[in-house]
Amino acid sequence: MYSPTAGSDVNWLLSFGTSPSKSLMDHFMKEQFIPELTDRSGYDEWKKNGEKSLVDRASEKVKKILKEHLVPPLDKDIQKELHDIIKRAEKELPKKL
């Protein structure tokens, strides 16, 4: 089945000397999955860059996200609704379960 976003279709078309359609080329680069944590360099380059394992790279990414990620504040109406729910629960639920 033809898929305008499948990268393999580009290779298939080019193997016959056919130019891929504009639609196919528009989607081609967007649909390429390149994992961020995979080290695709050669052994020597990997050694030179510190021999980091996948776990090392994942840990670094987690630390970076936790350090840099900013959570946008909740809308005032949502804050008020959550506050009302908490107050109602404090009144209605028993103090000890």
Image (cartoon, rainbow, N blue to C red):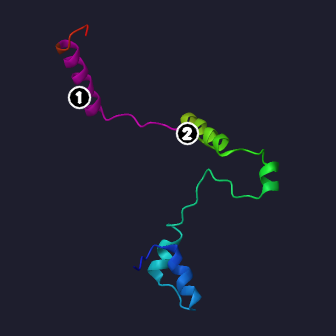
Give the mark nearer the N terminus: 1 vs 2: 2
Q: Which residue appears farthest toward the front when viewing the image?
A: 1
Q: What span is colored magenta in the figure?
A: 69-91
Q: Identify the element where label 1 is drawn.
A: helix
Q: Is residue 84 magenta?
A: yes
User: Which residue is at 78% across, 44% downward?
Assistant: 50
Q: Identify the element where label 2 is drawn.
A: helix
User: Which residue is at 39% across, 34% downward?
Assistant: 73
Q: Amino acid at mark 1?
A: Glu
Number of numbered discs overlaid on the protein picture: 2
**In what quadrant of the picture does the C terminus appear?**
top left
Q: Position of residue 48 (x, y in %)?
A: 82, 49
Q: Is residue 94 magenta?
A: no
Relative vertical location of residue 20 with respect to residue 68 in this rendering, above or below: below
Residue 43 — which label? none
Q: Which image quarter: residue 56?
A: top right
Q: Position of residue 79 (x, y in %)?
A: 29, 29
**In what quadrant of the picture does the N terminus appear?**
bottom left
User: Which residue is at 77% across, 52% downward?
Assistant: 46
| Magenta stretch prevailing secondary structure | helix
Q: Contact, CB < 8 Å: mark 1 with mark 2?
A: no
Residue assigned mark 1: 81
Residue assigned mark 2: 65
Query: Is disc 2 surrounded by few (<14), some (14 to 19) or many (20+) residues within 10 Å?
Result: few
Q: Position of residue 33 (x, y in %)?
A: 54, 62
Q: Amino acid at mark 2?
A: Ile
Q: Which image quarter: residue 39?
A: bottom right
Q: Which residue appears farthest toward the left when viewing the image?
A: 92
Q: Is residue 89 left or right of residue 63?
A: left
Relative vertical location of residue 25 with respect to residue 81 in this rendering, above or below: below
